Image: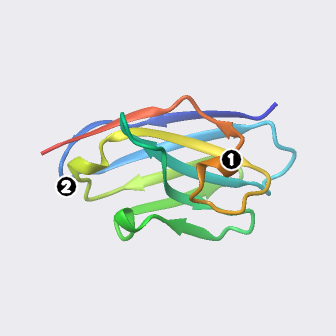
Amino acid sequence: QVQVVESGGGSVQAGGSLRLSCAVSGYSDSKYALGWFRQVPGKEREGVAGIGRDGSTAYADPVKGRFTISKDNAKNTLYLQMNSLKPEDTAMYYCATDLWVDSLMDPADFAYWGQGIQVTVSS
């Protein structure tokens, strides 16, 4: 049973930084895809950043240059370092994983999800 648990997040002023963590368990090895997604009320969930089975990364245009995704294979933990935060980054952030995905930015490709964690950026 694959389990995904997010931590971190909270409230910060614009220009500040936060780091999200995502602990993954239930896989037999470290070859799986991981992604961060976010959602605001009334809008569809959107991809933020992802890491593929081969370690390749992808970022959504609005976060390029500000967010960094990384993975610690020894700890089976995914991170999202968020710098230069903007009020429009305010959302519920979700971590997701699956063995194989066609797109790291498409939430429909991921089967296993965390409960979500709130990030609020004030101006």
Q: Quadrant of the N terminus?
A: top right
Toward which corner of the image does residue 63 lie, by quadrant? bottom left
Q: Position of residue 66 (x, y in %)?
A: 34, 64
Q: Position of residue 16 (x, y in %)?
A: 23, 51
Q: Residue at x 52, y 40 (%)?
A: 94
- Closest to the observer: 100 or 108? 108
**Is the C-beta separation of discs 1 and 2 under 8 Å?**
no
Instruction: Decide which of tag 1 and tag 2 comes sooner along the chain.
Output: 2
Q: Residue at x 45, y 62 (%)?
A: 68
Q: Position of residue 78 (x, y in %)?
A: 59, 49
- Closest to the observer: 67 or 73? 67
Q: Position of residue 30 (x, y in %)?
A: 78, 54
Q: Quadrant of the C terminus?
A: top left
Above-or-below relation of 54 to 1: below
Residue 76 in view of the camera: no
Separation of residues labelled 1 and 2 (CA atoms): 31 Å
Residue labelled with disc 2: 15
Q: Residue at x 36, y 70 (%)?
A: 65
For residue 100, side relative to residue 87 (left or right): right
Residue labelled with disc 1: 110
Local SS, label 2: loop
Q: How is the image coloured?
A: rainbow
